[in-house]
Image (cartoon, rainbow, N blue to C red):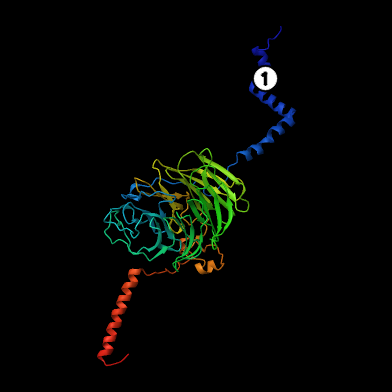
Amino acid sequence: RTTRPNDDSNNKNSKKDGGDDDATATTRQGQNKVKSHPSTYSHRHSYIPLLFNMFKLRTSKYRHVFCDQPKQEQLHTDFRLSTSTGEQQYVKASTKYWATALAGGGGPVLVGRHDRPGRFENGTSQIVQGHTGSVLDMEFSPFDDSMMATASEDTTIKIWSIPEDWEPTDESGMAKQGDDLKDSMLDLEGHAKKVQLLRYHPTASNTLLSCSADLSIKVWDVEASECVNTYRDLPDLAQDIIWDVRGDNFAASCKDKAIRLMDGRTCSETGKIETAHGGSKSMKLQYMGESGKLLSTGASKQSGREIKVWDLKNLSKPLHTEAVDTASGALIPLYDQDTAVLYLCGKGDGIIRIYEFEDKDPFIHKLNDGFRSTTPGKGYCMTPKRGLDIMGCETARIMKITNTSGLHPLQFIVPRKSDAFQDDIFPDCPAPVPAHSCAEWIGGSTKLPVTMSLDPKNNGGAKAAPKKTFMTVPQLKKECDELKKRVEYLEGKLKDSGISY
């Protein structure tokens, strides 16, 4: 009789004769297809390396850097900021202190300590006060944590020395009674209108850069209390000034949308970008170490915020343009020269974006989502590396000033399991030692910053420079009065003894 294909007996006979079940047959058919078409198999697998390269992740030691929202007990609060607005960052910091301008007459400046968070109380806590107009910008010396320069609407620049026992708040975080600092060490006069921005020289001691609403930029020898040179050809108000890593040159952005590169010693123009950004937002600048690249932030013609990287040897067009977003505030680029990590902050933003710079196309790489907060920041600055928690793997600390909730110290940490010093994420950083004096620099000396190790076992690797002391005018008058009294006393003794002189 004829056997049907699906008959059970036929299936049994097939298995007895060495036949395969359905799954095995299907597998063998697939293998036979692969074997019968070797060219198809090899062609398909040739795409695997290509796909791997397309989706390959860029490795970085700082890829997983993170920042948590600081706790309430870590904040500096209860002070009212100055209402003066401008191109300044509103807050500056050294390894020991931070400073911001307050509302009130006489240009008050609050100088707080990093290790004394808490509540400021007006009329009780110590302040720095000596100007006759509002203070617009502050700057700490890179070689002396207690030396601070202030720029004011009264057209002057004052240099202050913060006392060692300075404590606006006590250890419990409450306001502490103390005497205000009213006598500056010296005054720098020469600008005809309000002074907007200040920048200390990165390698030369007691050398300061300033720009003013009188459309000039001046280089000052602080120790000699004199202006070294002046650039007077700004067509409009300056938006930013920045030294390069050696301090041989500086760059200035202006409201005319141009960026000017200048020789630091002669204040002569050496290069110019006619229209760096098409939009009208403020432009901020950063030299990218020794790479020969300049980074600028601004806005496009469509008002979208953007970053551009320029080659200092060819300023005709940017090497790279990176769109950021469409927010309205100016971008503040904070660049860590040691680790090549860029922290991109925005005035009025609660977001800090993190990028890493690499000296090849596309030059900047986004590391992660950065820090996000619902509290907008008015201004930002970085704390020098020497003041960080190195053993806690804190690679950066950004001081964020707000309009209503005080000052927030934002600690950026790279997660590591080991308790040992992590030398791969902490390269040598600038030491508090000048590479040369202002006179040597003016004479043509060019040097990189003196560096030091951050390993606590090496005790910092470099000793701080001897603290430069200046005498204020009241101190000099007091000393002269005491000397006069001493001379009169000695003259009287000689006269009583019958000795002529």
Residue 10 vertical placement versus 357 (above, below): above
* Quadrant showing the C terminus: bottom left
493, 389: nearer the viewer: 493
Q: Is residue 288 visible?
A: no
Q: Which residue is mark 1?
A: 15
Residue at 68%, 26% in the rendered image: 30
178 left or right of 430?
A: left
Residue 352 vertical placement versus 266 (above, below): above
Q: Quadrant of residue 162?
A: bottom left
Q: Secondary structure at mark 1?
A: helix
355, 237: nearer the viewer: 237
Give the tally of numbered discs.
1
Instruction: Give, as a three-letter code, the residue at label 1.
Output: Lys
Percent of width and height locating residue 28: 69, 25
186, 396: nearer the viewer: 186
* Quadrant showing the N terminus: top right
407 left or right of 17?
A: left
Disc 1: CA contacts within 10 A as few (<14), some (14-19) or many (>=20): few
Q: Is residue 487 visible?
A: yes
What residue occupies the far bottom of the structure in this picture? Answer: 498
Percent of width and height locating residue 406: 35, 48
Residue at 55%, 62% in the rendered image: 266
Residue 260 vertical placement versus 266 (above, below): above
Residue at 28%, 62% in the rendered image: 179
